[in-house]
Amino acid sequence: MESLSETSWDVVICGTGLQQALLALALSRSNKKILHIDPNEYYGGPDAALTLQEVSRWVDDHASSSDKDGIFKSASITKALESESLPSRAYSLSLSPQIIHARSALLSQLVSSRAYRQLEFLAVGSFFVYEPATEDGAKPSLTRIPSTREAVFSSSAIKPKAKRALMKFLKFVLDYEGEPQSELWKARADEPLESFLESEFKLDPALRAYVVTLTLSQSGKISVKDGLSIIHRHLNSMGVYGPGFAALYPKWGGTSEIAQVACRAGAVGGGVYMLGMGIKALRQVPAEENDGATLEIELDNDITVKARSLVRGCGEIPAAETTVSRLVTIIGSPLRSLFEAVVEGSPTPTVAAIAFPKGSLDGASDHPIYVMAHSSDTGECPSGQSILHLTTLSSPNSQQILSNALSAVIIALSTEGEESPKRLYQFSYEQSQSSPDLSIDGTIITLPSPRLDLAFDDASLDPIRETWDAVNRILGEGDPGDYMMFEDREGVDEDDEL
């Protein structure tokens, strides 16, 4: 360990969340001396995917209302009797699961940096809307949302007149930034999308719910500007990597797997990695007295290292801008009806989205509830099981609302005459997000807290690029090269791109 203190590090990165990991990837070919640490014993930080044993320790650390990092709180575990026999390491439960649209800049960066070679991406399948029980006694059901022109034409759940209205909207949104479409919406850019859909396209409540669901808006009150952008991305992502799907999910733990691959690239590039190691104290010192280093960082093991720059996570969140409630449940059933390929030639999907529009669950929630279902093909649970991730905006009774939504989904997926899917294990928690702004204080850079989006937002990449620029300015070492643009390392065979 003495060599740590004897080295003058160019960059110390604290935390192995997706943001820090992608920064390490961006710096991995720079020949800089990088020390990458994490107070946790696992990679991924707030983006981690945990075994059951790790979940138990994580819940203990985040059970209070004021946990150590401010991002997570109020964590608890509910175990069914069967959970005692569950093999801990057979599970990889993501804390912040996100799907990634095919047109995402994140995928482009993973390709240009060659990191994609270490990742396996799976197809995200259908989006469903929950339909409550009817007065004539029909049980609750899940209705598949048609998100392509072909699916709209073939849908038997939409009346011909409504189909024409929906087709008119889909045609509009495919070229919404062109003329004359832009003139129609820009004057109403900040209004609710739902109102725009009603007045301009005469979409009925059911079709408006379909469109808003495709945005995965946590509040359900997404603006015209943001809503059209997301729907446009969804439609333009359809078929990019194969027929029948618009988004992807990284196998073995979602964005947690991307973070680990990015950190491995950092290690191959010469970075030194230490898990279970945080920062105890931080002192700024004159560079001319310390071999060019401006910081002395005391680690948890009492060793002090010298660094020219420090990049760290957001630390405590003084005032959360948004908080969501999450419920993660292992289901003892493959839930095959959710993961059916609906387009000829398309791969079997491994992730499906279910939305409860606001008010659809006995009027109990003022916000939508989303359920992201993962099959065992994600590598996150054993064969014959599946995982449900439920999310809604936090409220005094949001965890009860999520529990009720889980029960409703299980009823909707149950087949008459067969045993209902069992809950084998579940845990819940609250997750908060602060300001999305990056903080640069001299040679200390603080990244914003991760976003809470269910689909990866490319705006999350902006602070990483800004940090890369800032680190290169601080170090002042000539041309840093093109951002995230690398050739294959020697010995890597050419193969098909993503």
Image (cartoon, rainbow, N blue to C red):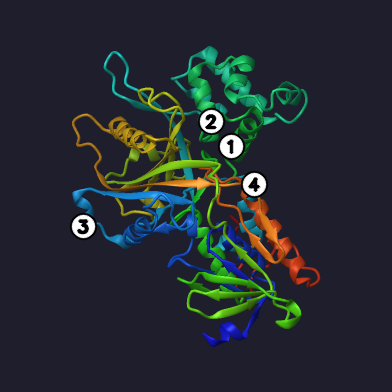
Seen from the viewer's position, the closer of residues 197 and 41 is 41
The kind of residue tagged 4 is Ala
Using the numbered discs, state the Cα–Cα distance from disc 2 to disc 4 in whole angstroms. Answer: 24 Å
Using the numbered discs, state the Cα–Cα distance from disc 4 to disc 3 in whole angstroms. Answer: 42 Å
The residue pinned by badge 2 equals: 147
Q: Position of residue 53 (x, y in %)?
A: 32, 61
The residue pinned by badge 4 equals: 459
Give yes or no for contact between labels 2 and 1 (Cβ–Cβ under 8 Å).
Answer: yes
Numbered tag placed on residue 234 in the rendering: 1
The kind of residue tagged 3 is Ser
Label total for image: 4
Q: Position of residue 129 (x, y in %)?
A: 43, 28
Is residue 272 shown to the viewer in this render? no
Using the numbered discs, state the Cα–Cα distance from disc 1 to disc 3 in whole angstroms. Answer: 40 Å
Which mark is nearer the camera, 1 or 4? 4
If you read the primary sequence from the N terminus, does the residue marked by circle 2 or circle 4 appear first?
A: 2
Q: Position of residue 383 (x, y in %)?
A: 31, 52
* Quadrant position of residue 404: top left
